[in-house]
Image (spheres, grey):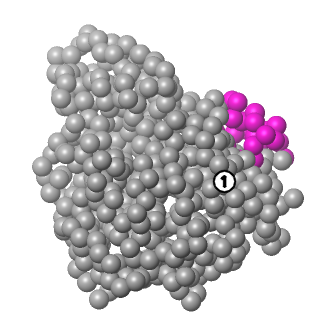
């Protein structure tokens, strides 16, 4: 039996040694001082609603993910920008065939109510995602679970329907955090670094240090309050006035303002986050291949990066894998602005003079300005785009994917398999453009099972080429996460999977008076 090759950084006596990790200092610029215990921190995210939840299976917003990582622990986790999973509640994960996985759990881990975490809790947590009434955000992953059972008090066996080399990566996402057995509606009683003191959906969450956390020396902060301030200007003002100590979703135009004050810092994390233009393949003219190619050729990517995102983005190439991610295919020719060629595609399809509405919203970062640029360049090739700016409230439920042309916004995913399975497989619920390709689906299953990394890279590379050439989505740039924070908040690090240090800042951060 072979062990999965993840990092075992600071694995001591079956438990992770937190001191070594905390001493890294992360993206706070480092410090010669030793991390100290104590401090009260107020954090403002960009969105909250009455659907805020304590159930990690249903998490849907940045503050949900932060809250869940503070309350619960996972079998594996992502500690840094390597995107290689580290062991967490699992002290070993082994497999012979990538179908049957044996998980050995840490001993002595306790929930906030004092009960011991055992294999039954893990079995319950994984299998509940298969219940259609739950509405788990990772139900598509749970569909791969043919069997999940306990093997003694601290052993778990997961048998998949077919081989998947990325299971340890998938177990690290926040939705897979472990809850107590028997809890159909988790109430925050987890094994995480903080305990729940107050939870008021759409208003605030207050969490206090778990003094019996199973990882030594974590966390350092005594108390964290999570609130939402939807307006970006108001959010920045709250930071600079000292009302909050950390914020996310900073507009690139606000970076200079924050950096001008010596008491505050920005943490800029290049990521694979993207706002994409969706062209439905089940509608006309957006389902016409010439139309799709014309739109991709009229996107001025350097202008979008410079004018909209102040160069806090990187040029993308109409496929969702960023250059720093595993399996990125560097051999796909970069699509560049070519007005003449775009006009040729429009004329060949007989679409000159066609008028088409484009729906955008501030809910999809940068989409309003991108739509204006598209409208300008469309006029040069004979297309008349009508920009429809919709309110952020209700955009995702009312407009996204419901018209021939809309904008989406996709958060990073830790693996190519997750990203392709969620957004590009023919039967995926979130296949935004409705693109269907049987060969793509076959390659996805083949790559998922592969043990040969060179073969996986080849398969994922071909899939990126197919999305680039045929899929009805245009991805012009990858956006950086931009967080703002009080300089006294130390121990932060960039994790390209999400804001607030990959949603896990509270476990590492400490306050320096």
Which quadrant is home to the C terminus? bottom right
**Residue found at the far right of this picture:** 513
The residue at the point 44 percent across, 53 percent down is 185
Q: Is 69 on the left-hand or right-hand side of 316?
A: right
- Judging from the image, what secondary structure is the residue with disc 1 in? strand
Of residues 422 and 228, the one nearer the viewer is 228
The residue at the point 53 percent across, 35 percent down is 49
Quadrant in the picture for residue 460: bottom left
Of residues 68 and 260, the one nearer the viewer is 68
Q: Position of residue 323 (x, y in %)?
A: 43, 55
Q: Position of residue 369 (x, y in %)?
A: 50, 24
Query: Which residue is denoted by mark 1 in the rendering?
Result: 197
Q: Is 340 on the left-hand or right-hand side of 250?
A: left
Q: Position of residue 497 (x, y in %)?
A: 50, 55
Q: Position of residue 493 (x, y in %)?
A: 64, 61
Boundaries of the magenta span:
233-262
Query: How many numbered discs sit on the rendered protein?
Result: 1
The residue at the point 62 percent across, 80 percent down is 17
């Amino acid at each position: 039996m072979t062990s999965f090759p993840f990092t075992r950084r600071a694995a001591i006596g079956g438990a992770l040694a937190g001191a070594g990790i905390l001493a890294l200092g992360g993206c706070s610029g480092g410090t010669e001082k030793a991390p100290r215990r104590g401090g009260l921190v107020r954090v403002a995210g960009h969105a909250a609603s009455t659907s805020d939840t304590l159930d990690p299976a249903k998490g849907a917003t940045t503050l949900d993910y932060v809250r869940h990582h503070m309350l619960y622990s996972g079998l594996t986790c992502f500690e840094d920008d390597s995107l290689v999973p580290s062991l967490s509640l699992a002290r070993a994960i082994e497999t012979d065939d990538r179908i049957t996985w044996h998980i050995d759990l840490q001993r002595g881990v306790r929930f906030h109510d004092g009960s011991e975490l055992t294999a039954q809790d893990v079995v319950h947590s994984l299998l509940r995602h298969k219940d259609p009434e739950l509405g788990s955000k990772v139900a598509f992953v749970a569909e791969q679970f043919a069997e999940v059972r306990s093997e003694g008090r601290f052993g778990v066996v997961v048998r998949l329907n077919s081989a998947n080399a990325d299971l340890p990566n998938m177990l690290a996402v926040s939705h897979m955090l472990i809850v107590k057995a028997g809890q159909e509606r988790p109430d925050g009683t987890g094994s995480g670094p903080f305990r729940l003191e107050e939870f008021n959906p759409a208003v605030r969450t207050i969490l206090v240090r778990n003094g019996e956390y199973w990882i030594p020396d974590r966390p350092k902060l005594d108390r964290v309050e999570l609130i939402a301030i939807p307006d970006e200007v108001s959010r920045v003002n709250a930071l600079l006035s000292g009302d909050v100590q950390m914020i996310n979703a900073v507009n690139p135009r606000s970076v200079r303002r924050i950096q001008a004050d010596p008491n505050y810092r920005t943490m800029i994390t290049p990521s694979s986050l993207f706002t994409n233009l969706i062209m439905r393949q089940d509608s006309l003219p957006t389902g016409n291949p010439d139309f799709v190619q014309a739109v991709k050729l009229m996107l001025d990517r350097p202008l979008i990066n410079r004018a909209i995102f102040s160069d806090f983005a990187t040029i993308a190439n109409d496929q969702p894998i960023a250059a720093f991610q595993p399996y990125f295919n560097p051999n796909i020719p970069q699509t560049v602005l070519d007005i003449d060629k775009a006009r040729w595609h429009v004329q060949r399809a007989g679409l000159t003079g066609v008028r088409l509405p484009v729906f955008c919203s501030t809910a999809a970062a940068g989409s309003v300005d991108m739509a204006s640029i598209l409208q300008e360049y469309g006029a040069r090739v004979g297309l008349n785009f009508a920009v429809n700016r919709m309110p952020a409230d209700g955009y995702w439920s009312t407009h996204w994917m419901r018209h021939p042309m809309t904008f989406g916004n996709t958060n990073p995913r830790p693996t190519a398999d997750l990203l392709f399975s969620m957004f590009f497989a023919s039967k995926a619920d979130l296949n935004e453009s409705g693109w269907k390709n049987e060969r793509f689906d076959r390659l996805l299953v083949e790559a998922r099972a592969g043990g040969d990394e060179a073969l996986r890279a080849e398969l994922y590379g071909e899939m990126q080429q197919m999305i680039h050439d045929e899929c009805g989505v245009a991805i012009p740039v990858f956006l950086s996460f931009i967080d703002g924070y009080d300089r006294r908040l130390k121990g932060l690090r960039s994790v390209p999977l999400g804001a607030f240090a990959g949603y896990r800042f509270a476990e590492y951060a400490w306050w320096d008076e």
